[in-house]
Image: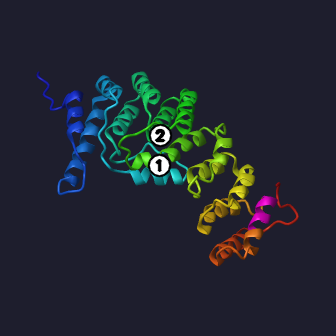
Amino acid sequence: MVLVTNRIAPEAILQKLTALRISPGPDRSKNIRQAIRLFEELVESGPAALPAIGAFLDRLEDTSYDAEADGLRRALKEGRLTTDFVLPPSLRLGLFDVARQIGGPEAEQILARSLESTGRGVEVAYLAKALQELAPDRYRDAALAAARELLANPAPNAQPDRLDKGSRDFLFAVLAMYGDTSFAAAAQSQLLRADGEIDHSALRYLKSTLGEQALPAVQQALYDARLREPEQKEALLHFISSYVGQNRQANELVRSVILDESLPMELRVNSLSSLYKVGLNEDQPGPG
């Protein structure tokens, strides 16, 4: 009996994925369906696909698919690191996902090698999450070291795309995933950027790790003269108002904003609304 199969060799699938271009135009939908199908075929190939995947990833080559970037960033803003997408934003991220789904020691080794070699925040974040799913806490130190290194010394990227613009979000999300506060002091000093705007990546990281302990740094940023636009205070006030009724310092800060006639009325009204929504426990207003 002869078994007939139409399964394509993993190397041939990779060649097709490398050549595939997904960009605006009449073939976009067709190419998206083809890419999804090819990734599924790699997963169906099982462990036999891993040597080809590992060899490709070791070459640090990539193809951008310009997809799901906004979805990944939205997940981060909601406090989630995700390994779930229909079409990956890039070939490398798709191959990480294939290795994650196949699983096993060889897949772990491939993902761990990529974690050591990549200079992209989005890849560090995805790899940290994937490895955490495959082997809880085994790669914690490696993931945190990679995230801290790129936060302190961002790798130059000659052709950054939409995912690279959110690199700090991804890296801070890795620290937050592990509850790591080692970068908290630096994040507090970086709340206000040189251009007078709030660093929302640092602010989200501080909220997920330090919580109300970051209120003194947030207060300092709130009244920093470099804060160019009053609207920039909105994110800081949102941070503060989440602790109203629980923390005395938060209560006092919100009150001071309400009484500050130099601020836009809308900002003051929003602050007043936060008091009404939460209410104040004047007998036990919390620490601070």
* Residue drawn at the location 35% of the way across and 36% of the way down: 92
Q: What is the magenta range?
A: 247-254
Nearer to me, 71 or 191: 191
Locate residue 204, reporting x and y percent: 60, 51
Locate residue 231, reporting x and y percent: 59, 68
Q: Look at mark 2 in the image and give the residue it sits on.
A: 121
Identify the secondary structure beneath mark 2: helix
Spatial CA distance of label 1 from label 2 is 8 Å
User: Of callouts 1 and 2, which one flags the residue occurring earlier in the amino acid sequence?
Assistant: 2
Locate residue 183, reporting x and y percent: 64, 39
Locate residue 125, reporting x and y percent: 48, 39
* Residue drawn at the location 64% of the way across and 63% of the way down: 238
Q: Amino acid at mark 2?
A: Gly
Task: Please give the count of numbered marks on the rendered protein.
Answer: 2
Question: For residue 128: magenta?
Answer: no
Whether 141 is drawn above or below 23: the answer is above
Identify the secondary structure beneath mark 1: loop
Cβ–Cβ below 8 Å for labels 1 and 2? yes
As drawn, is 198 to the left or to the right of 57?
Answer: right
What's the mark number on residue 166? 1
Q: Amino acid at mark 1?
A: Gly
As drawn, is 165 to the left or to the right of 11?
Answer: right
